[in-house]
C-alpha cells in the first residue's frame, strides 16, 4: 500500500493556487495557503511539542525559523529524532538548481536552516546541484549551467558549512554514482504516476520525465559509497532528512512511496514556507525575475532601490493614514522579510507593535530592512572572497567525511 492518495499525487492546482516544483502562484489577490498545502500533501504541522523536543535533543534553543513557523511542516520528523536518540546513523540532504550567477535571499532559507541542523546534530550533509534539471527546464546551455553551478557552490560554501562533514556534488559530474539508484527508482515508477505527480504533458521533453529519479537518488545512503560503506551492515537503516521548501515535496512523496521496494528507509522532510517576492505574498522570490529578488551580489544602492521601490507595503498611503490606522502586517513584505532575517525576538516584537499601530512609518521599517540586508550581503561577500577554486574543489571532491 502506498503512502500517497490521489489528491496528494496530483500537482496542487486549484482555482485558488498553483504550487508545483516549478511554479508558485497564489489565488488572485491572495497569498499562499499553507494549511491547504498541508492537507493536500498529507504532511504534518510542526507542533510546539516537537519544537520543544528539538531543543531537548540538541541542547540548543530552536532556530528562529522553527520558532516563527517558517519551517512549519514535516514528514517523519518525530521518527527521525527517535532514530537519532537511539544512536543510529542519518544524514542531511538538500540542493540547489543553479539558474543564476548568484544566490538570492530566498535561497538562504534552506541552506541557513540546514547549517543549523548540521551544527546541532553533528551529521554529514550532501548538497545536490541539479544543473541537469536547469538545462532541461531553462533556456540555457550546458556550459552556462556549469558556470552557474560553480558560482552558486561558492555562495553556499561561504555560508559556513563544515568541510569535514559536507559533500557538494554536480549531477553532471557525479551521475555515475547516482545511476544505480536512479535505475532502481525508475523501475518502480511508471509514466502514468510521473504525469500525475508532476503534471507533465505529452509535449514536454522526455528529459523532464526522467529527471525525478535523479533528485530522489541522494535520499539513499548507498548513492554515496565514499561516505557510507557498502560493508556497513546497517547501511539499509541509515535515514535521511531533507530540509526544503514545500514545493519540492512531490519529489519525495514519490521517493517515500518506493523506498521500501529498493530496501531503504523513507526520507524524512522538514518544509519551509516561501520567501515571498518583493511584489507580494502571491508568489516566491525567483531568480527568473530580477525585480522580485534581492541577490547576495547586489550593491547597497541596488538593495536600497529594490526595497524602497518594489517591496509591497501594508502601511498607510500617507503619513496621516499610517498614524491613524497603522500597517497591515499580514501583507507587508518588509515586515515579512524581517521575520526571516531579524533574529532578535524582542526587537521584532517592538517593530511589529509600533508599525501596526502607526507609531513607526513605512520608510523607517524599510530602512531597518535595507541596513540588515546590506549587513548580511557584506558579511557574505567577505566570506565568499576567501572561497578559492581550490576550496570549491575540496568540497566537491569524492572523499570520506568525518562524523
Image: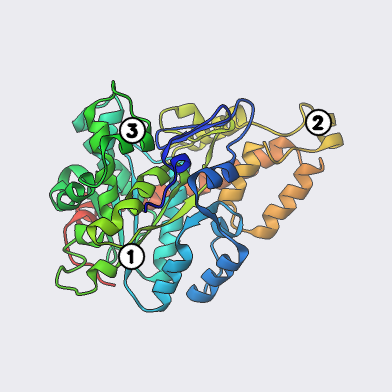
Cα distance in 3D space between marks 2 and 1: 55 Å
Residue at the spot of label 2? 319
Quarter of the rendering containing residue 371: top right
* Residue 92 at x, y percent in the picture: 35, 60
Position of 320 relative to 218 (above/below): above
Residue at the spot of label 1? 239
Residue 214 appears left or right of 30: left
Cα distance in 3D space between marks 3 and 2: 52 Å
Residue 376 appears left or right of 134: right
Q: Earlier in the sequence, mark 2 or mark 1?
A: 1
Judge depth for marks 3 and 1 and give the one in front: 3
111 vs 221, nearest the viewer = 221
Cα distance in 3D space between marks 3 and 1: 28 Å
Q: Residue at x 54, y 47 (%)?
A: 38
- Crowding near pointer 2: few (<14 within 10 Å), some, many (20+)? some
Q: Residue at x 30, y 52 (%)?
A: 258
**Label placed on residue 195:** 3
Q: Quadrant of the N terminus?
A: bottom left
Q: Earlier in the sequence, mark 3 or mark 1?
A: 3
Residue 147, can we see it? Answer: no
Position of 225 relative to 328 (above/below): below
Amino acid at each position: 500500500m502506498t503512502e500517497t492518495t490521489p489528491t496528494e499525487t496530483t500537482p496542487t492546482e486549484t482555482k485558488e493556487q498553483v504550487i508545483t516544483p516549478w511554479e508558485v502562484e497564489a489565488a488572485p489577490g491572495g497569498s499562499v495557503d499553507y494549511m491547504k498545502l498541508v492537507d493536500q500533501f498529507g504532511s504534518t504541522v510542526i507542533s510546539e511539542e516537537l519544537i520543544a523536543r528539538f531543543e531537548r535533543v540538541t541542547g540548543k534553543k530552536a532556530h528562529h525559523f522553527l520558532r516563527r513557523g517558517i519551517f512549519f511542516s514535516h514528514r517523519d520528523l518525530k521518527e527521525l529524532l527517535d532514530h537519532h536518540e537511539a544512536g543510529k546513523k542519518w544524514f542531511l540532504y538538500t540542493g540547489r538548481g543553479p539558474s543564476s550567477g548568484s544566490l538570492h535571499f530566498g535561497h538562504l532559507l534552506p541552506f541557513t536552516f540546514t547549517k543549523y541542523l548540521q551544527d546541532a546534530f553533528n551529521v554529514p550533509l550532501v548538497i545536490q546541484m541539479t544543473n541537469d534539471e536547469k538545462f532541461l527546464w531553462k533556456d540555457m546551455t550546458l556550459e552556462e549551467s556549469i558556470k552557474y553551478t560553480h558560482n552558486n557552490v561558492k555562495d553556499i560554501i561561504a555560508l559556513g558549512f563544515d568541510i569535514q562533514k559536507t559533500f557538494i556534488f554536480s549531477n553532471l559530474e557525479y551521475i555515475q554514482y547516482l545511476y544505480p539508484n536512479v535505475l532502481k527508482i525508475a523501475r518502480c515508477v511508471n509514466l502514468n504516476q510521473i504525469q500525475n505527480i508532476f503534471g507533465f504533458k505529452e509535449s514536454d521533453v522526455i528529459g523532464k520525465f526522467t529527471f525525478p529519479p535523479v533528485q530522489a537518488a541522494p535520499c539513499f545512503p548507498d548513492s554515496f559509497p565514499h561516505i557510507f560503506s557498502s560493508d556497513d551492515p546497517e547501511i539499509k537503516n541509515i535515514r535521511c532528512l531533507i530540509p526544503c521548501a514545500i514545493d519540492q515535496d512531490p519529489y519525495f512523496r514519490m521517493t517515500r512511496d518506493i523506498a521500501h521496494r529498493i530496501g531503504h528507509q523513507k526520507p524524512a522532510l522538514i518544509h519551509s514556507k516561501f520567501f515571498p517576492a518583493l511584489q507580494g505574498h502571491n508568489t516566491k522570490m525567483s531568480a527568473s525575475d530580477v525585480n522580485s529578488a534581492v541577490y547576495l551580489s547586489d550593491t547597497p544602492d541596488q538593495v536600497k532601490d529594490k526595497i524602497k521601490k518594489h517591496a509591497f507595503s501594508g502601511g498607510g498611503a500617507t503619513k496621516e493614514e499610517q498614524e491613524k490606522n497603522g500597517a497591515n502586517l499580514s501583507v507587508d513584505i518588509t515586515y515579512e522579510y524581517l521575520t526571516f532575517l531579524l533574529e532578535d525576538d524582542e526587537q521584532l516584537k517592538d517593530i511589529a507593535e509600533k508599525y501596526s499601530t502607526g507609531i513607526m512609518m513605512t520608510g523607517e521599517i524599510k530602512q531597518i530592512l535595507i541596513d540588515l540586508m546590506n549587513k548580511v550581503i557584506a558579511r557574505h561577500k567577505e566570506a565568499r572572497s576567501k572561497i578559492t577554486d581550490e576550496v570549491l574543489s575540496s568540497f566537491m571532491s569524492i572523499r570520506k567525511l568525518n562524523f
